[in-house]
Image: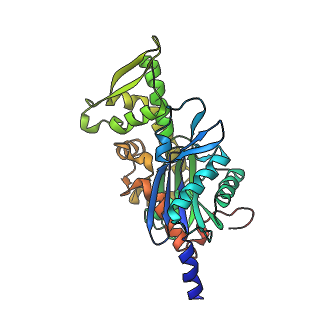
């Protein structure tokens, strides 16, 4: 039996996937995290040919001729374009398998906690059609808690806030289950959109989401960085009055003003979750603190902002971007131990 398992693993390695709105990360059993790519596919609509996937496709966003479209197949954490999502998953799975797809892998894939049964099935079906032998779903906040090393089996409560591209997941976890939680479609993409709107209304400048994201990364912050708001970034776009190219300087304070609404939405989800949490577990969270994960947690000062707004201790994991996929990878490698954490679908795990 052991010989057969070794022979089987020689043809295929099971994988875990963090299928995000902004980025997809893949963990391969025995190899760790081997892929981080934008969740973007470039398609030639004249013949439906796939031109690029991942980083190369993201470079095309907002820069393509009419017959080419750079598509993000996920929106707000769920699949918006099933066929393109399947193409993207197949591409990434083939890349990391290193020609080992003779035997199809088992895949553990993270999903937002607030998705419907139909949306869960869409993720499962797309992954199966992309080449998976078996698909196990795990909610992203649970995977994030596992990746952060939180004591999910203990009666002690832990709170994790996973801020992604399309959704922010807030969950209080104890005894391998979610005691209270919220999934809100307010996250990194919403911050980018508010920067786009700010440039439109304040500077009569049309910029794309990629430019807004670059500004956010360069000078964005949730609180004033050591009282210094002198940092500036150059926003390039189209002047709405003249129709000509134009560049405008924006500073850190303006960007922070632009993103205050989505930040407030995340804090409100945390407050509502804390209100739903039993008093005994609330005491655990006050002692242990709120744990931040996800790419959106990389925004400067967001831990300080949440701590100020909630009056709770907040700590950041070492690598917020990989926390979900590391947790999904551990659940994959120790599937028997983590069996209770997988989402049940159609009456089966």
Nearest the viewer among 112 and 158 is 112
Quadrant location, the N terminus:
bottom right
Q: Is residue 114 visible?
A: no
Residue 273 placed where, x, y %? 54, 49
Q: Residue at x 48, y 25 (%)?
A: 197
Is 214 placed left or right of 278 in the picture? left
Q: Tell me if residue 253 comes above or below residue 275 in the rendering.
A: above
Is 155 placed left or right of 287 in the picture? right
Residue 31 placed where, x, y %? 44, 69
Nearest the viewer among 158 and 213 is 213
Q: Is residue 136 visible?
A: yes
Is 95 placed left or right of 220 in the picture? right
Q: Residue 100, located in which quarter of the rendered image?
A: bottom right
Residue sticking out furthest to the right: 346
Q: Tell me if residue 115 comes above or below residue 204 in the rendering.
A: below
Q: Tell me if residue 328 comes above or below residue 211 in the rendering.
A: below
Residue 223 placed where, x, y %? 34, 37
Residue sticking out furthest to the top: 242
Q: Residue at x 59, y 29 (%)?
A: 66
Q: Tell me if residue 9 comes above or below residue 159 in the rendering.
A: below
């Amino acid at each position: 039996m052991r010989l057969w398992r070794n022979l089987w693993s020689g043809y295929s390695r099971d994988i875990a996937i963090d299928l995000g709105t902004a980025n997809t990360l893949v963990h391969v059993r025995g190899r760790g995290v081997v892929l981080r790519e934008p969740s973007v596919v470039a398609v030639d609509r004249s013949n439906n040919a796939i031109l690029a996937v991942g980083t190369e496709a993201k470079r095309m966003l907002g820069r393509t001729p009419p017959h080419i479209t750079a598509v993000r197949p996920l929106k707000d954490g769920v699949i918006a374009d099933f066929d393109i999502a399947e193409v993207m998953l197949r591409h990434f799975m083939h890349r990391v398998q290193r020609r080992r797809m003779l035997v199809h892998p088992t895949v553990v894939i993270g999903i937002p906690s607030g998705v419907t049964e139909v949306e869960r099935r869409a993720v499962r079906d797309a992954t199966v059609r992309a080449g998976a032998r078996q698909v196990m779903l795990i909610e992203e906040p649970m995977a994030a808690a596992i990746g952060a090393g939180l004591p999910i089996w203990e009666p002690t409560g832990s709170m994790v806030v996973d801020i992604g591209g399309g959704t922010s997941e807030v969950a209080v976890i104890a005894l391998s289950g979610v005691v209270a939680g919220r999934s809100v479609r307010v996250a990194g993409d919403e911050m980018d959109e508010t920067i786009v709107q700010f440039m439109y209304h304040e500077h009569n400048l049309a910029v794309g989401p990629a430019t807004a994201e670059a500004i956010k990364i360069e000078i964005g912050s949730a609180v004033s960085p050591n009282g210094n708001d002198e940092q500036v970034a150059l926003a390039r776009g189209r002047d709405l009055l003249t129709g000509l190219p134009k560049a405008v300087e924006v500073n850190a304070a303006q960007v922070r003003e632009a993103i205050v609404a989505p930040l407030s939405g995340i804090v409100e989800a945390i407050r509502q979750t804390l209100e739903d949490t039993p008093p005994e577990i609330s005491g655990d969270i006050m002692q242990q603190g709120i744990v931040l994960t996800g790419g959106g947690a990389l925004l400067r000062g967001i831990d300080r902002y949440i701590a100020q707004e909630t009056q709770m201790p907040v700590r950041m994991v070492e690598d917020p971007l990989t926390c979900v996929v590391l947790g999904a990878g551990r659940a994959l490698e120790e599937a028997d131990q983590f069996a209770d954490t997988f989402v049940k679908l159609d009456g089966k795990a």
